Image (tube, rainbow, N blue to C red):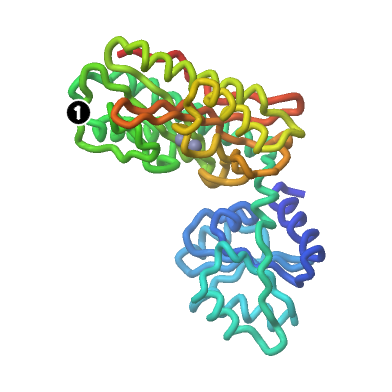
Amino acid sequence: MTELEQRRRAVQTALAGHKVDALLVSSLANVRYLTGYAGSNGLALVTPFETHFFTDPRYALEASQSITCKLHIAKGPLQEAVAGIVKRKKLKKIGFEPAWLNLEQHQKLKDLLPLGASLQPVPGVVENLRMTKSPEEIDQIRKSVRVNSEAYARTLRRVRLGMRERDIAAELDYQMRLHGAEKPAFDTIVAAGAHSALPHAHPTGQRLEENDLLLIDMGACLDGYMSDMTRMAFLGIPTKRVRTLYDAVLEAQMTAIEAVRPGVTAARVDGAAREVLKRHGLDRQFVHSTGHGLGLEIHEGPRIGKKDKTVLRAGMVITIEPGAYIDRLGGVRIEDTVLVTANGCEVLTPTTKEFVHL
Ligand code: ZN
Ligand code: ZN
């Protein structure tokens, strides 16, 4: 059985537990996970014994060569074709993904379904499977991480005083693509000086000045798989205050990484980072969660946050990225992509966490 077939089989097995006759998969990442389809208009309908994939004629050739389940090229709306299969197969209870079907689509689908068929929300079936990565997926993520770090290293050598944040972001994105990425995993963050205190800063025309903190948060998307890393540099010799801030965040990050192993909850890992920052009087400057799963999407389960009770399992890939943000001074965040292994974890990100002075 191929890996795609195994994934579809796992969804089929889950159907009975949710008391539905089929699951309509409308999240494109979930569709890709189950069928390999990487385009922008596709739906999958998983029934107990088969999986139907629906797309439009633009993808007919590509799909006919790559799709290994039942392929339907729909000339009209995909939902009409889905309703046609529901009717033909006499399916009654159709599960749908409530996070990935908007109200309008839900209403339309409901109107199209044959008499006696109904829609039931079934959240998170495919997302749960996606949390644990296969060896092939882990290889893909490793490649993505490597390209990301290579692009960072090549860009950092070119960083000079007077460059604008957006010049650096453009160079990072260029280097990423040059080394094999399809695209950045998200809008690359380059934040200099006081901007670094904004956890989701967008690169501006601001130029690098002496004594600026420089925060770079970047990820690559390679064959659909994401990586994510944040590193800090300093333009000049950092003051004691800045160095203390950096060391505290690094200590929190390393402590959280040490807490990562199968059997612990995501909340416990988050707590490990939070306790260290609290000891340094920085807990209130840590305004986000410690990390997130990643894979076909940049943010997946589990969320490494205060309230997430997900128990970590070998094969999960998560980020560990505590930060502390101080108005006017700037912010520090340090982020690695980390694989949960049988005995603990492996930090996939090869880039040094030494505080670089440029
Ligand atoms: Zn990041
Ligand atoms: Zn992240």
Looking at the picture, does residue 127 appear above or below residue 153? below
Q: Is mark 1 within 8 Å of ligand 1?
A: no
The residue that disc 1 covers is: 207
Q: Is residue 297 left or right of residue 148?
A: right
Q: Residue at x 67, y 62 (%)?
A: 69
Residue 22 visible, this orientation: yes
Q: How many marks?
A: 1
Give how far across and how far down residue 203 sits, in percent. Answer: 28, 37
Looking at the picture, does residue 226 appear above or below residue 157? below
Give how far across and how far down residue 155 sits, in percent. Answer: 33, 24
Q: Residue at x 53, y 46 (%)?
A: 297
Q: Residue at x 51, y 33 (%)?
A: 144
Q: Is residue 127 left or right of residue 49?
A: left
Where is the C terminus found, in terms of image quarters? top left
Q: Amino acid at mark 1?
A: Arg
Q: Is residue 211 left or right of residue 113?
A: left
Judging depth in this view, the residue of 124 and 61 nearest the camera is 124
Q: Quadrant of residue 348?
A: top right
Give how far across and how far down residue 107 sits, in percent. Answer: 54, 80
